[in-house]
Every structure is written in C-alpha cells, then in structure tokens.
Image: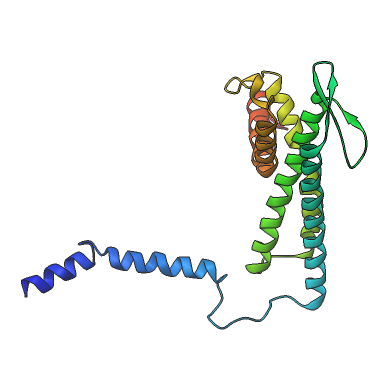
Amino acid sequence: MGLQKESQFRATGGNGSEANSAEVGHQHIEELNDDRAIGDWKSRFCGAAWRQIIAELLYLVVLLSLGTLALLDAAIAPALPHEGGNAYVSTLLGIKINPDALKWIALWVAGLLGGTVFALKWLYHSVGKGLWNRDRILWRLIVPFNSATVSIFTGFLFSSGAVPFLKNEALDTPLMTLAFGFIFGYFSDNILAALQNLAQKIFGTLGQSD
C-alpha cells in the first residue's frame, strides 16, 4: 500500500505537476491547431479572400527571391583592384560597385530580407488563426521596404559611433553586415518603438506643458 502511494506521489511530482503538465500540453495543442476543433478542416475564408492572400504571398516570395538573388550576385561577383580595397562587378547589372557602397547596399538588402521574412511569418500566422483581413495589405506591401530603410539608417547610427556598446568596426566584415542588417530589418518595429521612447524622454510629447 505504501509503495502504491509512493509511486502515485512520484507520478504527480509530489505537487500536482501531472495536472499542470496536462494543462500546459492542452494549451500547446490548442496553439498548434489554431483554436480549432479536431476534424475542423474547412477554410475560414472565401475565394475572394484567398485570391488576395495568394497575391500577398507571391509578392513577398518575389521580394525574398530577388533579395536572395542579389546576395548571390554579390557572392559570385568578380573583384577588381580599387582604391581602398576591391571593387565588385555585378554579374546581373554589369556595373562596378566600390566596397563602401557595397556594404550599405548589402545592409539594405539584408534589411529587406529580414522585413520580408517577418511579413511572411505574420501572413501565415494570421491566415491560420483567422486574423487575416484585407486592410492589412498596405502593411505587407510597405513592411519590407520600411525594414530595409530602418536597417540602413540603424547601420549609419552604429557606424557613427553614437551607440557606445557597439564598436564602429562591427559592420566592416560582410558576414557581420548581413547578419546585423537582417536583424535590424526583422526587428524594425522594435527599433522604431525604442527610438520613439527615446525621443519622448529627450524631447517630451506633443501637448506637454513647459
């Protein structure tokens, strides 16, 4: 009898952890099935909605493909001697790009890719959970380019030395430039929110009395 009680005690972790684990597991299953009942496979959206969803998906996939193609072009581009380093000749455009310009172009493209991946993630999340609506199309059209712009100007901010915890040389290597550019683009909303909070602390808010 004592052994049976001890085994039950261990099974529950001594504090009801079995029930807690079951509850957490149930919540995890609900998250995976998009709050649908088992066997509920029908789409929430009509044909007109799906046409726009597919159009948004194709737009983002094209941007993702073009950005990836631009990175591949830079990777295979031949290098030519140039003052201060090697210049690169784009195999797609046939133009010569100096190293300084290439760094900022790479940062912009990486930011575009980060914003595109972010928009793609929210597209399939919103469709799966039934949160998609037609008015979000402007958000999906603008976010990749907004992210690219935030990425390059955040790079300017870091390279200027205005951010004390990051060295000016952080963007000097191609891999670091691409990595930071993608992160800046993916989290562009967070960067803009942080800048807004900083501006409010420094300059105050509209309508604030002197």
On the picture, is 184 further left or further right than 146?
left
On the picture, is 191 further left or further right than 64?
left
Choose between 85 and 122: the one closer to the eye: 85
Choose between 25 and 131: the one closer to the eye: 25
Q: Among all residues in the image, which is located at the extreme right?
A: 94
Quadrant holding the N terminus: bottom left
Q: Is residue 153 above or below residue 65?
A: above
The image quadrant that residue 97 belongs to is top right
Choose between 134 and 7: the one closer to the eye: 7
Quadrant holding the C terminus: top right
State the residue at coordinates (73%, 46%). 113
Q: Is residue 54 above or below residue 41?
A: above
State the residue at coordinates (19%, 65%). 10
Q: Among all residues in the image, which is located at the extreme left?
A: 2
The image quadrant that residue 48 belongs to is bottom right
Q: How many marks?
A: 0
Position of residue 122 measured from the top left corner of the image (x, y, whole percent): 67, 57
State the residue at coordinates (23%, 61%). 15
Q: Among all residues in the image, which is located at the extreme bottom?
A: 39
Q: Is residue 134 above or below residue 204?
A: below
The image quadrant that residue 146 belongs to is top right
Position of residue 194 measured from the top left corner of the image (x, y, whole percent): 63, 35
Choose between 73 and 185: the one closer to the eye: 73
**What colour scheme governs how the chains and residues are painted in the rendered image of this protein?**
rainbow
Residue 147 appearing in the image:
no
On the picture, is 38 further left or further right than 119?
left
Position of residue 52 measured from the top left corner of the image (x, y, whole percent): 82, 67
Residue 208 appearing in the image:
yes
